[in-house]
Image (spheres, coloured by chain):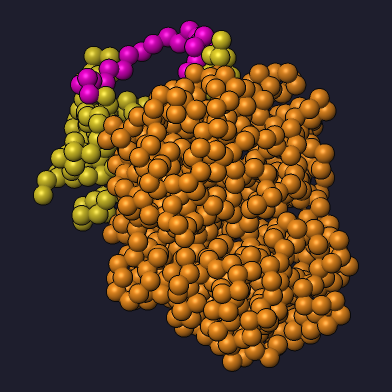
Amino acid sequence: MSEMAFFIDHSRCIGCQSCVQACAECDTHRGVSMIHLETIQRSDSVQTAPQVCMHCEDPICARVCPADAIKKTPDGVVQSSLKPRCIGCSNCVLSCPFGVPKYRAEIDQMMKCDMCYDRSSVGKKPMCATVCPSGALTFTTMEEIQRTRSGIPINTWRFGNEIVKTKVHVMVPREIERVDVNLVQITSTPAALANDPFDVALMLEEVR
Amino acid sequence: VAKLPTDIPELVKQFGPTLHTVPPGGWANTGKDEKLVKTHCCFCGQQCGIQLRVSDNKVVGFEPWEDFPFNRGKLCPKGVKRYMQDEHPDRLRSPLQRVDGKGFVPISWDAAMERVVSEIRRIQQSYGNDSFAVLTGASLTNEKAYLMGKFARVALRTANIDYNGRLCMVSAGAASKKVFGMDRSANPWSDIPKAKVILVAGANIAECAPITTDYLWQARENGGKLIILDPRMTPIARNADLFIPVRSGGDIGVFNGMLHIMIERGWIDREFIAQHTTGFDAVMETVKKYTPEYSAKIAGVPAEMIVKAAELWGPAPTSFLLHARGIEHHTKGVDNCIAAINLVVASGRIGREGCGYAMITGQGNGQGAREQGQKCDQLPGSRDVENPEHRKYIASVWGVAEESIPRRGLSAVPLVEAIHDGKIKGLISICFNPAVSLPDGNYVREALEKLEFYVNIDFFLSETARYADIVLAGSLMEEDDGTTTNVEGRVIRHRQAVTPPEGAREDWAIINEIAGRLGYAEKFSAAPREIFEELRIASKGGVSDYSGMTWDRIDENYGLFWPCPEPGHPGTPRLYEGGKFGHPDGKAHFIPIEWRPSAEMPDDEYPIILTTGRVVSHFLSGTQTRRIGSLMEQYPQPRCEMHPRLAEKFGIADGDFVKVESRRGEIVVRAQVVKTIRPDTVFVPYHWPLDRSANNCTIRAIDPVSNIPEFKICAVRVSKTVAPDDAIAQLEMEAGGIR
């Protein structure tokens, strides 16, 4: 059997927070949720987006850590900071292109999603990807995801000039090979758009 | 006259709701000598499989149960945190007696039982058997639902028993019975991903049946199209191929309009209609006038949306209809469902793989609890309480005279009205929180104050239990054994994970003891496994026939679908195969449906439509989920969703305090200004009590056939107001306060 992998499909997310609730049930950090569920702009849309650690092949958080406190396991899972080493400087927090690590002042340490290493290292699925009722978070084989989904999984990102490859995949429409994230100046909010696709009032006006 | 025994803040101080935020032994406790108990979630009709982590007779956590085929380990946030109910500080651990001026004080089981039995006798001797009523719930197991029906008919001999499924599944059930001759979802969920078009009418699946989302998305991965009808853009509507933001109560416009176009363009299965149905001509005649333009006026949406819906649904090779409370909670709830089902039958796409229809059951045992005889009009096996043959059979199972079984009693809303009118004087209730869940909340609470005697069985002191004379400490789902029947009609097993805490008892043991003290010990001595053995005999030959099932067979097969009429029968996951329906003539019966207005339409005085519903982290009246810290954190207080255009008209900004008032009552909540709702409609979730209870505003109007209340539309006005600072407002949010 081939290797299990983590897939995020934002189009499936329903914002239910099962992942957030279940993350706090993972035994290595019970009571504390590591996953982030972003509500994009509730006034405009019900779109939400879950964010686990993407587990970069060459993790920037680890590269910028002055205390060498962030380690990657041989199977590619980037761990939370090592308590004896972490100096709480938050370089990792600032550097992560996905906004994943969080500095926890109460324990003076950076903690983040470790793909439920206590579970995934013994053949179980991470909590969030097991309970997710919409399939927005899925832990399965590459063959299975290709067999069951209409989109394709990608794991290459470009932030400015930086190419980042991640262990976690994101489902995208078939024609896309890489996600390019560019800095854009937002000059108008979606609310100002003439054809806001999520405004129910505008949908009703199409009558004429 | 039972006014509250002390003020509400004092009752809240004594019995909550308070929040439970940490599992037994703390977060660091990962369990010594832990065992995993395979069981099911206690909340909604999906009844997801889950494993409870049990240590030292305490539920300390959960573990997904990936082998259970319905949900494969998936859970919503309520399922994840349900274990926090166990070991809850608010848990009732003794019978309680009301003491005026003080609240409730513990008394012994013997004294409590003596009081209950003497009051039942006094009231029934003074005013007649029917003056003592029974209200039950659809979160009870099949065994307990069966027991409650038998208790009312045999031990109390009262006609007046009904259940809170009256607020949930009765419109869907009645429509299904009328058209198909049976009351059950027609297909297993595994048919959903095989459908090429899916119509979801009035179902906020992402929040109320979250696990079903994956089935919908899987259909889309397979190339299926998704049509959603809802006044709000719900999370599943966001990604639908066609979202129709229908006006609440306007659904028939869409359904009849679609059928009109399907007939016009030849997208109906004439051969199927001729062979397997009756009554299509009358339907054709009725929908003749439902042109897209005519229909659009009723539905309150552009006509082209209805045309598009017909174009997606009409010619599809396979299809699936799903509906829920959005179309059912109406004074025309049954008609709404029939009009939707007509689309299924006219297409001939039912009873085959990937072709069919389902109603999305709301409550945990919403399906089973309506089959075992705790409805005012039903006996076990979905039998009719007025049918002489049915009565005779059940009388033989119970060992009573047929004429001793009472006739049809009052359904939930008329039953509460009879209490208000002084015709019903005594009440026993279990698993029902009408002070929060029934419409016209002020009227309901007035009614509760008029009871001469009220005994409530529950594991927490619900808002309704505050009106009781005696409260009996019952059991949580995980403290008892039994079966439920899920949304698909699959009968599944709940396993006892822990025993009830000292001082509390299993619900069935409480009922058996009351019946015993009333002189019926020999008919009420069974524990759940034996009750199931009696239940399956009682169901034999009925529509919902469980007679071929045993608990062991249910365990071995991950549940069994009824009908399962003999030992060894594999069960029936898909109904109506080969176009064979449940009526004696074997056919589906078309019924023509005309749209009619709702009981209260908006007018100059109350110009806005209020519609109510649920949020994902809470369940029904909230008596369970408002006690779980992390679920409250997710959605702490009700908000009034409104479109920015409406908000602007009244000078309301996001987060402002607003008063929502109808002719019956009012609430003050914060506004949530969102573009995802129709500008003529506001939405308030109903899980909160007192001055935060959306049901203060809703209307006490019911469907003439199903008697479901019209929760989904009433007329209100909305205005900006200041932060309330009265004693109720200052309570914690779980108790009805506001921040």
Question: Main structural element of the magenta stretch: helix, strand or loop?
Answer: loop
Q: Residue at x 31, y 57 (%)?
A: B69
Residue B201: image x %, image y %?
A: 50, 38
Q: Chain A, which colour?
A: yellow
Residue B624 in the magenta stretch? The answer is no
Q: Residue at x 64, y 49 (%)?
A: B687
According to the colouring, which chain is orange? B
Q: Quadrant of residue A153?
A: top left
Looking at the image, residue B18 sits to the left or right of residue B396; the answer is right
Closer to the camera in the image, B626 or B546: B546
Looking at the image, residue B4 sits to the left or right of residue B595; the answer is right
The quarter of the rendered structure image containing the C terminus of chain B is: top right
Residue B731: image x %, image y %?
A: 73, 50
Residue found at the very far left of the displayed protein: A1
Residue B195: image x %, image y %?
A: 33, 39
Give above or below for A18 relative to B418: above
Residue A189 in the magenta stretch? The answer is yes
Closer to the camera in the image, B435 or B597: B597
Q: Which residues are magenta?
A: A174-197
Give above or below for B318 relative to B292: below
Closer to the camera in the image, B272 or A133: B272
Residue A16 in view here: no
Q: Residue at x 79, y 37 (%)?
A: B662
Residue B149 in view here: yes
Residue B235: image x %, image y %?
A: 47, 34
Q: Quadrant of residue B196?
A: top left
The quarter of the rendered structure image containing the N terminus of chain B is: bottom right
